Image: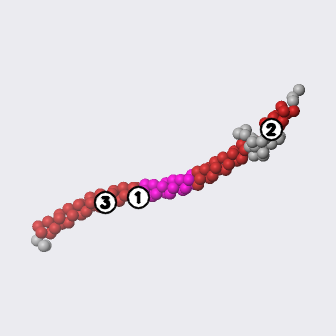
Amino acid sequence: MMSAKDLEEFAINTGQRPSPSNPNPKEDRGSLDLTLLIEQANKKIKELKNVIDGHKSWHASDKQEIYDLKIVLGELRNLDVVNAQYKTLISELKRDNRLLAKQCDDQLKQFRNKGAI
């Protein structure tokens, strides 16, 4: 059987009765107090939700930037195709110009030989 002093110490240790060093036992329940642990967990959850929201906004901006870069890349590839087509056209025009210049020279020689010029 517990003595009165043992019962009083038990009550003080379990927070049922104030001790002389701690007149309000509900304020200091120790590190295993569930309300304190729940408050800390809720605070941590709130912080993590803020971090997640920040990452979501970064992700959304990254997705937009990737989309913009794909559009620019598509335009660049289109310009490369157009540039290759222009190079082909320029080489054809150069060849045609040489042929025409040769034909003009040949016709001028013929006219000179005939005495028309």
Which is closer to the viewer, label 1 or label 2?
A: 2
Instruction: Look at the numbered disc 3 and give the secondary structure of its residue.
Output: helix
Instruction: Look at the numbered disc 1 and give the secondary structure of its residue.
Output: helix
Question: Residue 115, percent across and down?
Answer: 11, 71
Mark number displayed over residue 92: none
| Residue depicted at 41% across the width and 58% down the height | 79
| Residue at image mark 2 | 12
Q: CA distance from mark 1 to mark 2?
A: 83 Å
* Residue type (three-letter) at the residue carrying disc 3: Ile
| Residue at image mark 1 | 79
Question: Quarter holding the N terminus?
Answer: top right
Asked if residue 100 lies left or right of residue 7, the reply is: left
| Residue at image mark 3 | 90
| Residue depicted at 48% across the width and 55% down the height | 69
51 vs 105: above or below: above
Q: Residues within 10 Å of mark 1 (few under 14, many from 20)?
A: few
Asked if residue 52 lies left or right of residue 104, the reply is: right
The answer to the question of whether label 3 and label 1 lie on touching residues, with beta carbons closer than 8 A, is no
Picture quadrant of residue 10: top right
Which one is in front, 77 or 37? 37
Asked if residue 98 lies left or right of residue 10, the reply is: left
Q: CA distance from mark 3 to mark 1?
A: 16 Å
| Residue depicted at 25% across the width and 62% down the height | 97
Q: Is residue 35 visible?
A: no
Question: Residue 78, percent across and down?
Answer: 43, 57
Q: CA distance from mark 3 to mark 2?
A: 99 Å
Which one is in front, 97 or 71? 71
Q: Which residues are magenta?
A: 58-78
